[in-house]
């Protein structure tokens, strides 16, 4: 009985067309209509798409709708989609477009409004080496607020560059700015970050003094 | 990785360097080895440490993690939508197949209908005689300047019907199995302008030209109706039904040899007037012959004239009438000597 079960399991593994691991052949399989490849692409990239989508839309249901629409559109057009050497970037760009259509339809937002969302979510950990663990939650929050003074665009470029490891060409396309503009934005973001980092220590001390007197 | 170039790097350079970023993000053993070595060997590490501090701070940012339920629930939604799509596609494809099948069937049916109305026409020119075998094996010998028309799908329609213009001799194949019961489809019909003829299996000559319509029976039995006078008869061999402008269809005795002589290329005369011979000449060869003396037209002739060539006929007539043949591009005249 167990023997039969074992054989059964082995057999079922081979009846499915298992798509091979590397991205380019996975994509090729998908364009040929392979459902398993399609699902594998979803499984590989959904987490990254979720995070990026949430940082922009902040609403899990909306993000779900957008990723759903994106993958359905992918499936409908699988025959005519060309090759791509970077699936991750392709999906990010496609998700962004889907989100734009979604928001302009749902909230009647103008395209321009959505293109430059100033509320990209990127919360830095207030528990930096300069903040002692004894600080109350309220104070940590205040410090956090002080630290989060980068603009939405600056936060987005930091996220794409350092968390998604995209290059400037990709970032410029995704954020709808010129490559030169991307370099500038990145420089400004890092400057702002540096200032905040160095001001951090001084600010903590200042805040401690300020709030301590208020509370006690 | 070259350690040398990093010696002169600014903080910003480090923050734009993919290898540096990779080291701080992933912490691979290989990268750790390299950068530890760099730290030990390099002299000025201020910008290096500043960059490290910034990058470490950046990577301290809170991640937004996807709940497992989100992944699975969304996948089900997507799979459902895709299945729906595939289903609709299948339905559409099936519909297309059915429709194109129906269209093909319709095309065939229409083709069939069209074909069933298509007629075959065989035409003889002036001076031409033709032998035609009909689909049922019946033979039609078509005289000059005549035509027969019959349905293309004769065999499928089971209708043996021929429309005749001019003169033809018919040798109809007998289809009837049971002498007592004669079925519709076994009858052979000939339609001319003035006569409607029905036979079973027989040989007869039909002529419907100018002012005379006649059918003379050699063998078998035919029924003939005049479409002009409405009179009808059933003929026995050696009988002829004849209708002219003056007289309605009536039966006369005939000599089949006389009526059929044209099949062998001759014309048999029995007190036949020259006028009638010249009419036959015109019917067969398409040329009008004038007479210098109108009285020549009333001359009666007995005997057989060969009708195999135009000039032959003219020559023979000229001899009989003691005249000369005067031919030019527009007319033929028999001139009395």
Image (cartoon, coloured by chain):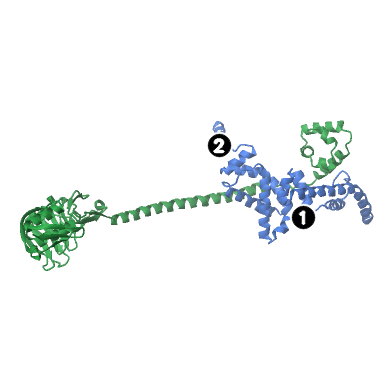
Question: Can you give x and y, in whole percent of width and height, for residue A172 in the image?
Answer: 73, 49
Question: Which corner quadrant holds the N terminus of chain A?
Answer: top right
Q: Is residue B332 visible?
A: yes
Of residues B6 and B252, the one drawn nearer to the viewer in this rendering: B252
Please report the residue visible at 7 percent of the width from the left and 65 percent of the height from the top: B295
N-term mark: 1 or 2? 2
Cα distance in 3D space between marks 1 and 2: 48 Å
Label 1: state its secondary structure: loop
**Apparent side of residue B30 relative to residue B137 in the rendered image (left or right):** right
Q: Is residue B254 visible?
A: no
Report in which chain the residue with disc 1 lies: A
> Which tint was used for chain A?
blue
Q: Nearer the viewer, mark 1 or mark 2?
A: 1
Of residues B245 and A85, the one drawn nearer to the viewer in this rendering: B245
Of residues B112 and B69, the one drawn nearer to the viewer in this rendering: B112
Question: Can you give x and y, in whole percent of width and height, for residue B26 in the image?
Answer: 76, 38
Q: Which chain is green?
A: B
Q: Does residue A187 sit above or below B279 in this rendering?
A: above
Give the residue number, with chain letter if any, for mark 1.
A119
Report in which chain the residue with disc 2 lies: A
Of residues A214 and A192, the one drawn nearer to the viewer in this rendering: A192
Question: Which corner quadrant holds the C terminus of chain A?
Answer: bottom right
Give the residue number, with chain letter if any, for mark 2.
A12
Label 2: state its secondary structure: helix
């Amino acid at each position: 009985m167990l023997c039969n079960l074992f054989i059964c399991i082995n057999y079922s593994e081979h009846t499915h067309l298992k798509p091979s691991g590397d991205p380019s052949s996975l994509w090729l399989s998908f364009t040929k209509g392979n459902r398993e490849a399609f699902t594998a692409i979803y499984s590989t990239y959904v987490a990254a798409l979720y995070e990026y989508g949430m940082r922009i839309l902040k609403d899990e249901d909306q993000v779900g709708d957008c990723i759903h629409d994106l993958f359905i559109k992918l499936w409908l057009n699988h025959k005519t989609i060309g090759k791509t050497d970077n699936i991750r970037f392709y999906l990010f760009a496609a998700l962004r477009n889907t989100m734009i259509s979604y928001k302009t339809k749902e909230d009647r937002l103008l395209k321009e409004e959505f293109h430059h969302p100033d509320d990209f979510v990127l919360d830095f950990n207030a528990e930096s080496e300069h903040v002692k663990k004894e600080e109350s939650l309220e104070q940590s929050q205040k410090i956090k607020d002080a630290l989060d003074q980068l603009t939405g665009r600056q936060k987005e470029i930091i996220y794409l560059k350092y968390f998604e490891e995209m290059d400037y060409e990709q970032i410029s396309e995704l954020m709808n700015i010129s490559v030169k503009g991307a370099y500038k934005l990145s420089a400004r973001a890092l400057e702002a970050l540096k200032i905040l980092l160095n001001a951090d220590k001084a600010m903590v001390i200042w805040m401690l003094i300020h709030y301590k007197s208020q509370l006690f | 990785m070259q350690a040398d170039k990093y010696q002169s790097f600014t903080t910003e350079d480090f923050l734009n360097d993919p290898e540096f970023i990779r080291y701080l993000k992933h912490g691979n053993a290989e990268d750790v080895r390299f950068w530890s070595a760099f730290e030990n060997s390099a002299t000025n590490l201020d910008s290096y440490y500043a960059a490290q501090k910034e990058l470490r701070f950046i990577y301290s940012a809170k991640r937004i993690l996807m709940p497992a339920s989100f992944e699975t629930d969304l996948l089900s939604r997507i799979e459902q939508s895709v299945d729906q799509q595939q289903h609709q596609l299948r339905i559409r494809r099936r519909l297309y197949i059915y429709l194109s099948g129906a269209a093909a069937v319709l095309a065939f049916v229409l083709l069939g209908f069209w074909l069933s109305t298509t007629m075959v026409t065989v035409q003889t020119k002036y001076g031409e005689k033709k032998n035609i075998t009909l689909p049922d094996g019946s033979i039609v010998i078509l005289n000059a300047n005549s035509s027969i028309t019959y349905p293309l799908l004769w065999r499928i329609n089971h209708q043996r019907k021929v429309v005749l213009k001019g003169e033809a001799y018919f040798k109809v194949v007998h289809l009837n199995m049971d002498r007592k019961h004669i079925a519709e489809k076994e009858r052979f019909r000939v339609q001319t302008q003035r006569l409607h003829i029905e036979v079973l299996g027989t040989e007869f000559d039909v002529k419907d030209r100018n002012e005379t319509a006649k059918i003379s029976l050699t063998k078998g039995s035919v029924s003939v109706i005049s479409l002009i006078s409405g009179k009808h008869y059933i003929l026995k061999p050696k009988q002829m039904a004849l209708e002219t402008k003056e007289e309605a269809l009536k039966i006369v005795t005939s000599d089949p040899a006389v009526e059929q002589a044209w099949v062998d290329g001759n014309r048999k005369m029995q007190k036949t007037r020259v006028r009638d011979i010249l009419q036959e000449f015109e019917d067969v060869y398409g040329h009008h012959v004038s007479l210098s003396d109108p009285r020549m037209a009333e001359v009666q002739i007995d005997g057989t004239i060969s009708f195999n060539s135009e000039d032959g006929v003219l020559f023979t007539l000229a001899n009989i009438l003691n005249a000369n043949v005067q031919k030019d591009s527009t007319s033929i005249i028999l001139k009395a000597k």
